């Protein structure tokens, strides 16, 4: 088959990019022709392959026809504003771009498209549109009608969690399939555990912020109420900006003054996996104090790092929000919390009960396999016609 892939956020190399490029690797392994619509730096693909440990050798890069091409609604609106007999050059250019997109996409058997919250016009035989964020979009009747037109034909919306699906299904009337993101759990394994609580996440304060500030509050509460604990909190993650200029990171450093908190910024993969393997407990706070009915996009929509931690033998203690309860079952393979004091108390209960800690650790190691790369590929393969 001839298959096209598109990801508007490719240069971020985040979880969505791992998702899309894992699909590419799988399709390439079956001998399909796989084209990636991308007009940016070509060395990005090599970087992505190295970061995500993917074989993308035969992936073809083709012109990005989606980034600047207008959709049909834009064309109609522009056309309606012009009444002269001679069309303006801008409209002619847009018409050419639009029909170029029609011509090119109709030449594909399948297009897998990561959505930015909107629906594209695609003319391939089969359309798989991936949503990784639980958008709540106020849609006008005209937009709803256009969306129904865009969903005509063999279209499936591929969703990264049941949490996300719950919002998408109320916005877009189409067949939905939940396929959890691929986690390469074989890369992670437990080692001798140390008195370390770990959290991994980028150091910024946008969208679904990882809320390391809350984790520092929890650690402060824990150590204040139990001053004899010899435990350390390690906050690891990436910083797009120069760490010296990252204002949020500076704020965290100030907040952690006097506490046994260590920061690890932009660690390489080997350093990170080693840290995972020796840490005993994993904390996650993305989505804390978020009203997820009105702002679901500000939660953790799934939680790949939580699965990585579980595969490394860490016991997860995570906020009860977003897609995290689909991974962590309270009292079985970890704990869910809703307040700083609750997270602190659950952590101390685990620290003071080694047998319970081992039981939850064993359960976490067992249940993480349902989110493996192999399960992802099996689930995704069922969508292809």
Image: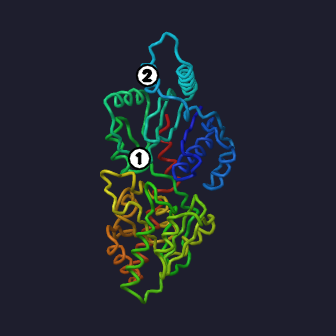
Reply above or below: 122 against 381. Answer: above
Q: Quadrant of residue 158?
A: top left
Q: Give the x, y percent position of residue 6.
A: 55, 39
Q: Which residue is mark 2?
A: 76
* Residue drawn where x is 43% and y is 41% of the image: 117
Q: Secondary structure at mark 1?
A: strand
Out of 357 and 94, give the one closest to the viewer: 94
Q: Give the x, y percent position of residue 383.
A: 47, 39
Q: Mark 1, residues whose alpha carbon is within 10 Å: few (<14), some, or many (≥20)?
A: some
Q: Mark 2, residues whose alpha carbon is within 10 Å: few (<14), some, or many (≥20)?
A: few
Out of 60 and 373, give the one closest to the viewer: 60
Q: Is residue 377 left or right of residue 149?
A: right
Q: Quadrant of residue 36?
A: top right
Q: Quadrant of residue 270?
A: bottom right
Instruction: Report the label total.
Output: 2
Furthest toward the top, the residue is 85
Q: CA distance from mark 2 to mark 1?
A: 34 Å
Q: Nearer the viewer, mark 2 or mark 1?
A: 2
Q: Give the x, y percent position of residue 70.
A: 51, 29
Q: Report the disc number at residue 178.
A: 1
Reply above or below: 302 against 104. Answer: below
* Residue drawn where x is 35% and y is 44% of the image: 136
Reply above or below: 46 against 275. Answer: above
Q: Give the x, y percent position of residue 129.
A: 46, 38
On the rendered image, what quadrant is the N terminus found in? top right
Q: Report the disc number at residue 212.
A: none
């Amino acid at each position: 088959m001839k298959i096209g892939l598109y990801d508007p956020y490719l240069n971020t190399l985040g979880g969505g990019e791992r998702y899309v490029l894992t699909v590419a690797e799988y399709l390439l392994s079956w001998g399909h022709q796989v084209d990636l619509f991308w007009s940016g730096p070509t060395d990005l693909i090599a970087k992505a392959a190295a970061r995500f440990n993917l074989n993308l050798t035969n992936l073809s890069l083709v012109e990005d026809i989606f980034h600047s091409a207008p959709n049909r609604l834009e064309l109609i609106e522009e056309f309606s504003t012009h009444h002269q007999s001679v069309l303006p050059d801008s409209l002619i250019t847009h018409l050419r771009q639009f029909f170029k997109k029609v011509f090119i996409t109709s030449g594909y058997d399948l297009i897998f498209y990561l959505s930015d919250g909107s629906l594209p016009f695609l003319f391939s035989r089969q359309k798989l549109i991936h949503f990784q964020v639980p958008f709540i979009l106020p849609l006008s009747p005209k937009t709803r009608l256009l969306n129904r037109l865009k969903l005509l034909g063999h279209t499936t919306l591929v969703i990264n969690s049941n949490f996300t699906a719950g919002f998408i299904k109320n916005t877009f009337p189409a067949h939905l399939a939940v396929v959890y993101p691929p986690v390469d759990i074989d890369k992670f394994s437990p080692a001798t555990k140390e008195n370390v609580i770990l959290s991994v996440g980028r150091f910024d304060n946008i969208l679904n912020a990882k809320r390391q500030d809350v984790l520092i509050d929890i650690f402060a509460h824990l150590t204040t109420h139990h001053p004899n604990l010899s435990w350390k909190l390690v906050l690891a993650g990436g910083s797009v900006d120069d760490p010296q200029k990252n204002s949020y990171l500076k704020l965290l450093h100030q907040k952690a003054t006097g506490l046994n908190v260590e920061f690890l910024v932009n660690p390489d993969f080997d350093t990170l996996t080693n840290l995972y393997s020796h840490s005993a407990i994993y904390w996650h706070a993305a989505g804390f104090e978020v009203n997820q009915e009105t702002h679901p996009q500000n939660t953790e929509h799934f939680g790949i790092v939580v699965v990585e931690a579980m595969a490394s033998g860490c016991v997860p203690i995570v906020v009860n929000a977003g897609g995290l309860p689909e991974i962590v079952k309270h009292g079985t393979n970890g704990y869910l919390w809703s307040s700083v004091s609750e997270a602190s108390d659950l952590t101390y209960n685990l620290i003071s009960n080694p047998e319970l800690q081992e039981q939850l650790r064993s359960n976490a190691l067992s249940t993480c396999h349902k989110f493996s790369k192999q399960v992802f590929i099996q689930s995704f393969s069922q969508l292809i016609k």
